[in-house]
């Protein structure tokens, strides 16, 4: 099984979310008990909604538990010039001349709308280990994306 890479902050966030899901488990259980009191379960919308919420919550708990049981903590690197998790990278898309700042994060922390991309994404994985001035080709589902690395800032 592939281990999920986590930073310290991602690990803390995941543990907090896991604890919240466990608390929510008890709230949902109470909702199910309350809804049972409304009578015929076959036509009880509150009961079915609570059972669906319970199913979703349990699925999320299992996903998080699996990650928390098999994660690998990301180590800081001594190479301050190479792109790693937590690097902020300024890239130029050579096909369009657009320039963009990208923050490389773990897949747990990724948020593409805020330019936080996973180290496992096509662009993120292509950038890992590279340095300022290098030109790379990221292979994505939409084709090859030629990039020039303009700046690397490691936190």
Image: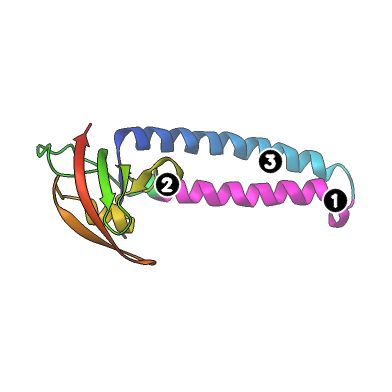
- Quadrant of the frame with the N terminus: bottom left
Q: Which residues are magenta?
A: 40-66
Q: Which residue is mark 2?
A: 112
- Residue 75 or residue 131, whichever sits in front: 131
Q: Crowding near pointer 2: few (<14 within 10 Å), some, many (20+)?
A: few
Q: Which dot marks residue 29?
A: 3
Q: Residue at x 71, y 50 (%)?
A: 51
In what element is the residue under mark 3? helix
Judged from this view, the residue extending furthest toward the right is: 39
The verdict on residue 52 being magenta is yes
Q: Which residue is mark 1?
A: 44
What is the CA distance from the residue labelled 1 to the residue labelled 2? 40 Å
Q: Nearer the viewer, mark 3 or mark 2?
A: 2
Q: Position of residue 113 (x, y in %)?
A: 46, 44
In what element is the residue under mark 2? helix
Magenta stretch, overall SS: helix
């Amino acid at each position: 099984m592939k281990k999920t890479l986590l930073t310290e902050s991602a690990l803390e966030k995941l543990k907090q979310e896991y604890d919240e899901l466990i608390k929510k488990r008890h709230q949902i259980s109470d909702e199910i008990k309350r809804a049972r009191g409304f009578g015929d379960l076959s036509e009880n919308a509150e009961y079915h909604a609570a059972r669906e919420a319970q199913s979703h919550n349990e699925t999320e708990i299992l996903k998080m538990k699996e990650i928390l049981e098999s994660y690998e903590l990301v180590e800081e690197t001594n190479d301050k010039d190479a792109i790693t998790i937590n690097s902020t990278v300024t890239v130029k898309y050579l096909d369009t001349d657009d320039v963009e700042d990208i923050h490389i994060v773990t897949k747990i922390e990724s948020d593409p709308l805020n330019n936080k991309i996973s180290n496992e994404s096509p662009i993120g994985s292509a950038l890992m280990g590279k340095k300022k001035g290098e030109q790379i080709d990221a292979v994505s589902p939409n084709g090859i994306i030629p990039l020039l690395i303009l700046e690397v800032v490691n936190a």
